[in-house]
Image: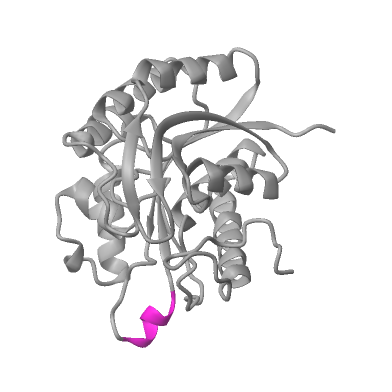
Amino acid sequence: MQPITVLTIAGSDSGGGAGIQADLRTFAAFGVHGTTALTALTAQNTVGVTSVLNVDPEFVAAQVLAVTEDFDVKSVKTGMLATPATIERVARLAADGLLPHLVVDPVLVSSTGHVLMQDGGVETYRDALLPLAEIVTPNLREGALLCGLDVRDVRSHDDMSALAHVILGFGPTYVLVKGGHLTLDSPAMRHAPDILVGGGEVVIFDAERVTTSNDHGTGCSLAAAIACGLGLGRPIVDATRDAKSYVLAALIGGASWHLGHGHGPIDHLGWSE
């Protein structure tokens, strides 16, 4: 027995909670071999992002080619791509068949509100990369941006499903709209629902909302976990369910940690157990 290989194309988080760092810990938790292509370096911590240095798109492609020419990559996850040019270059790699089971996490804005995508990125995602994705995993703000909507108008399961169907129209096979940012003062919002749309079905993955400020990197980790499941041959509904359970356990495990002064990391590796 040997591990399968998965690839993440994403940015680096110097605080270690999100990005490449979160992806690699998630890969380790699922017992797969993680490879990387860095798209950007960020100076950030649990409080926010202070600076970003983008990697040249051709060097991003060179990293991907170096990995795919040597490893049998089973699945790929994209995170922060940072510029329209990088999105387009990654899309060409996908069109060439080099990015199997592509999971696109359309990182547009950080959890602290820092913009992580240059102008034109939303349109480039829609036109170039989303049609090549097996699954796209936007949170509510990202989904609203992709659809040109006000996120405040997304207030229910039906609204989330409608948002997912609009994104599905851009060409991906599946869309998972994450509901962690729903904040209505109703009993339903004590939960954190994610809604998967595609293949003619709508599946709601629900879970109790974990009360903690240690939620940095949950989106990265969820997408990385889905990529692990797809690479391991799991059907997409099962891979998504497994990923949801994994992130929930990691949130619970790290809920009482005190790492940094803002939104801390989750317990990727089950240390609290």
Colouring scheme applied when the structure was drawn = one colour
Residue under the image location 29 percent in, 46 percent down: 108
Observer-nearest residue: 173 or 27? Answer: 27
Residue under the image location 75 percent in, 34 percent down: 3
**Which quadrant of the rendered structure holds the C terminus?**
bottom right
Magenta segment? 186-191
Residue 215 vs 114, above or below: the answer is below
Residue 15 shows in the view: yes
Q: Position of residue 107 (x, y in %)?
A: 34, 45
**Is residue 52 left or right of 191 when viewed as pictured?**
left
Instruction: Give residue 185's quadrant in the image.
Output: bottom left
Q: Position of residue 127 (x, y in %)?
A: 23, 30
Residue 265 vs 84, above or below: the answer is below
**Is residue 95 left or right of 258 when viewed as pictured?**
left
Residue under the image location 54 percent in, 60 percent down: 244
Q: Is residue 190 magenta?
A: yes
Observer-nearest residue: 104 or 50? Answer: 50
